Image: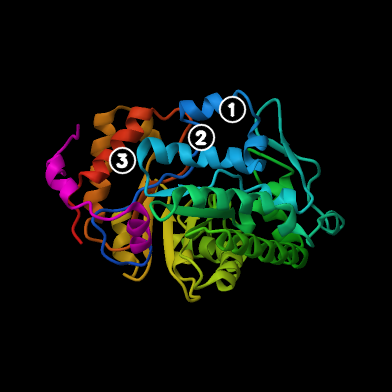
């Protein structure tokens, strides 16, 4: 059942759904016509699904990530249940630090903890940059298994954390409420900070190239901690321009370095939590760019300000999926109405799928999109 005034009858809508999921996703990434927007959800693999929870009773999270056959099963579960247009590999952004020789584990009190923190030049010397890709080969193995299962029906996404986001975890030594050390290091020892981020950017680029070679149809770079960037002085003298200049220095420049390395290979989606999408949209290497925005951003403003050649992804508030199907249908419909006719649009959440999301609400979200009267 669908709710609200944005929708057409099921039969009429389905007659226009003529594309396979992968074709729909690839076309949207390239700004070409689609019968409806493709949909996938960040963190769609696991957490909210009962079949994932059953698997989690037998295996640890790290075992699921590191075992290609198990990662494949978790990746495919949401596609089987909801018919998403893209599958994103079940993995973790911290695979890169671990492959660099900074292993992590889960704390009993919640969150993750690294075996050591990277806070000095001496700590940087402990990282093993050579051989990182070989140590992360289980990710490529999982991608190949998923690709074999999906074939040409459903798109496959790989991903990595941005250098700024990874650096925050690595410098803090794990999860943190504040994440203050990275920005302090940037201000106190810019030269060493830049050297660290430069090497991280090269490692992330190599990691994404490995995923592309293993069959990823597109990749997403998660700058999930972009919202932590503050201008040097808050209060008097604060300006959005100052914040964007700082974001360019600590994050966007390194994402640009990554994009230059993988330009033209597959579509690249950039997710930045916070209001930094104008900086990401300004990146200019060749290749398809899709800007994924969080739930606090006004999509109408994004649509009006981004040129037609840049795709847009987002941005339903994940908390809506804790409500009821009618609320989900209404919120989804309003986003679709805002973006209707905009080529290069991909429906997604404004952040990761919460573990408390109701399965019936996820199903309603997908059904609402499938039944929407989309203008090519």
Q: Is disc 3 placed on a helix, strand or loop?
A: helix
Q: Which sits in the foreground, 310 or 263?
A: 263
Whether 186 is among the magenta residues is no
Q: Where in the figure is residue 227, as x and y percent of width and height?
A: 53, 50
The answer to whether residue 185 shows anywhere in this view is yes
* Mark before the other along the chain sequence, 1 or 3: 1
133 up-or-down from 173: above or below:
below
Residue under label 3: 366
- Highlighted range, magenta: 1-28
Residue under label 1: 56
Residue 194 found in image quarter: bottom right
> Mark 2 to mark 1: distance in Å?
9 Å
Q: Which sits in the foreground, 229 or 210?
A: 210
Q: Residues within 10 Å of mark 2 (few under 14, many from 20)?
A: many
Q: Where in the figure is residue 200, as x and y percent of width and height?
A: 69, 61
Whether 8 is among the magenta residues is yes
Residue under label 2: 46
Q: Is disc 1 placed on a helix, strand or loop?
A: helix
């Amino acid at each position: 059942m669908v709710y609200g005034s944005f929708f057409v009858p099921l039969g009429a809508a389905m007659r226009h759904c003529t594309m396979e999921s992968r074709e729909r996703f690839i076309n949207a990434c390239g700004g070409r016509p689609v019968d409806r927007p493709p949909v996938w959800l960040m963190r769609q693999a696991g957490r909210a699904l009962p079949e994932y929870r059953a698997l989690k009773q037998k295996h640890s999270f790290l075992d699921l990530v590191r075992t290609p056959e198990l990662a494949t099963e978790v990746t495919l579960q949401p596609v089987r249940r909801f018919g998403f247009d893209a599958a994103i590999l079940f993995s973790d952004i911290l695979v890169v630090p671990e492959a660099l020789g900074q292993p992590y584990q889960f704390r009993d009190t919640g969150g993750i903890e690294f075996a050591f923190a990277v806070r000095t030049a001496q700590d940087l010397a402990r990282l093993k940059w050579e051989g990182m890709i070989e140590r992360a080969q289980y990710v490529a193995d999982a991608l190949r298994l998923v690709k074999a299962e999906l074939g040409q029906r459903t798109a496959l996404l790989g991903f990595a954390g941005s250098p700024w986001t990874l650096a925050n975890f690595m410098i803090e030594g794990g999860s943190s409420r504040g994440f203050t050390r990275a920005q302090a290091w940037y201000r106190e020892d810019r030269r060493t900070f830049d050297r660290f981020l430069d090497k991280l950017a090269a490692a992330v680029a190599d990691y994404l190239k490995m995923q592309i070679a293993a069959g990823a149809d597109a990749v997403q770079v998660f700058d999930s901690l972009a919202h932590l960037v503050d201008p040097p002085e808050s209060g008097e003298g604060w300006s959005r321009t100052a914040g964007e200049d700082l974001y360019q220095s600590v994050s966007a420049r390194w994402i640009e370095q990554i994009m230059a390395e993988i330009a033209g290979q597959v579509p690249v989606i950039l997710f930045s939590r916070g209001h930094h999408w104008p900086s990401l949209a300004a990146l200019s290497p060749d290749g398809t760019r899709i800007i994924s925005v969080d739930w606090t951003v006004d999509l109408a403003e994004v649509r009006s300000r981004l040129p037609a050649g840049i795709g847009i992804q987002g941005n339903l508030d994940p908390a809506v999926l804790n409500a009821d199907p009618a609320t989900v249908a209404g919120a989804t419909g309003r986003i679709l109405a805002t973006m209707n006719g905009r080529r290069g649009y991909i429906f997604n959440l404004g952040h990761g799928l919460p573990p408390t999301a109701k399965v019936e609400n996820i199903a309603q979200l997908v059904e609402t999109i499938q039944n929407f009267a989309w203008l090519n």
